[in-house]
Amino acid sequence: MPEADKIRLLIVDDHKVVRNGLRVFISLYDDIEIVGEAKNGQQALDQCAIHQPHVVLMDMMMPVMDGPTATRLIREQYPEVQV
């Protein structure tokens, strides 16, 4: 599948083992490209600016900035991104 047709995904979770597990599972799908990872909501905002994902897979309970706050800010700043 051409890169331009793939869903660009950002994984956000404060547990590395969870991020790694999701990466392994999701990498089985040819139509999804994992463009980045973040371990808290602030990093998720930063990664959205850098990688411009189509979808963010967001954990709810994280340090620094929790998932609901990060989701609200991402939806405000990047309304085309689905969380």
Image: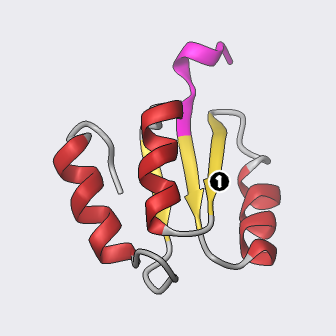
Q: Quadrant of the C terminus?
A: bottom left
Residue at position x 72%, y 67% in the image:
19
Residue at position x 40%, y 79% in the image:
66
Categorize mark 1 by other alpha carbons within 10 Å: few (<14), some (14-19), many (20+).
many
Residue 9 is drawn in which quadrant?
A: top right
Q: Which residue is mark 1?
A: 37
Residue at position x 45%, y 66% in the image:
41
Report the side of 40 relative to 24 (left or right): left
Q: Nearer the viewer, residue 31 or 69?
A: 69
Tag 1, which secondary structure? Answer: strand
Q: Nearer the viewer, residue 41 or 23?
A: 41
Q: Position of residue 20 (x, y in %)?
A: 80, 65
- Above or below: residue 8 compared with residue 71: above
Q: Position of residue 2 (x, y in %)?
A: 65, 13
Residue at position x 34%, y 65% in the image:
70
The stretch of residues the image draws in magenta is: 1-8
